[in-house]
Amino acid sequence: MRILKTYFEKKKEREMEEEIPEILYHVANMLSYTSIEEVINWIASREGEIGRRFLLVNRKIKNGESAERALLELRESVRSDFIKRAVDMLISECRTGAKNSNMLREVAEDMQDMLQARREKTASATVEKYTLLIAGTVIVPLLLGLMISISHNLSSAELGDFALSSVDSAIIENSILGSQIYIVEYAFIAALFIAIQEGKSENMLRYLIIILPSSVLIFNLAQRFNVLQVLS
């Protein structure tokens, strides 16, 4: 339950981060003619998680708490550095009243660039992740299994009614064993690589549980599949 709670909290904060640059641009314009309390009231009127968070801030202010204190409590309740930085800008406005619109725009622009870079990195990492998952779970074991199946069936076809020699049987058995070892190694490497890529080494076991049983199952099914019979 705790893992799920953390996941959903991070998901909500990611959604909030996407809105921060647009909000800061708008706040930079608003500060030239209105107060920080009105700015908070405007953010609280927005839909989504960020509107809900600022609605709580707005209620605290209306109940007599200072805007600075309410914003500090919001800052303490989030993990995201993006959101903390944006809230810090509003806290600074509360303390100084400087109405530094230019700095807000610069921060908004920096955040926009960082979010764009993060989206591109996430997209690239997602492609690599699913490529490894599909390769480790399906493609590699399927190809190895089919190769062994074809090799076994060709040997059987050449011998006809004769049984495979002990040498041929040993070669096939060693091929199966070698392929199984390779599949296990590949599963470990793929799971480790994906976990490192995510920056969460503890996720390795989760990916290994997905990749290893699936790859072994597909390999065993593929090596029993008679490709030559289907093609003939």
Image (tube, grey):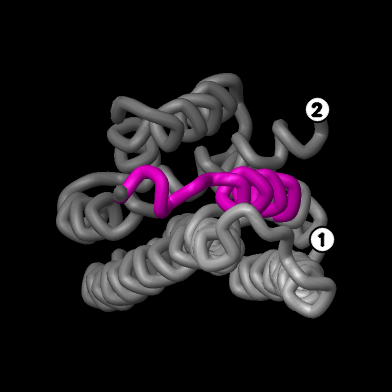
Sort mark 2 into few (<14), some (14-19) or many (20+) by Cα contacts within 10 Å: few
Precedes in sequence: disc 1 or disc 2? 2
Going by the numbered disc 2, the residue's amino acid type is Met
Question: Would residue 167 be visible to someone looking at this image?
Answer: yes
| Image side of residue 145 versus residue 162, left or right | left
Say which element carries label 1.
helix
Picture coordinates of residue 87 (x, y %)? 50, 56
Q: Residue at x 53, y 45 (%)?
A: 225
The quadrant in which residue 39 appears is top left
Which quadrant, please, contains the N terminus? top right
64 or 40: which is nearer to us? Answer: 40
User: Is label 2 in a helix, a strand or a loop?
Assistant: loop
Q: Quadrant of residue 4?
A: top right
The one nearer the camera, 127 or 77, is 127
Q: Is residue 230 magenta?
A: yes
* 44 in the magenta segment: no
Q: CA distance from mark 1 to mark 2?
A: 17 Å
Indicate whether 229 appears above or below 116.
above
Q: Is residue 59 left or right of residue 65?
A: left
Q: Residue at x 53, y 42 (%)?
A: 11
User: Could you tell me residue 65's position as x and y percent?
Assistant: 62, 32
Q: Which residue is mark 2?
A: 1
Q: Which residues are magenta?
A: 212-231
Identified at 30% across, 30% down, the residue is 46
Q: Is residue 76 above or below residue 164?
A: above
Q: Which residue is mark 1?
A: 202
Instruction: Give 92 or 82, whichever is nearer the viewer.
Output: 82
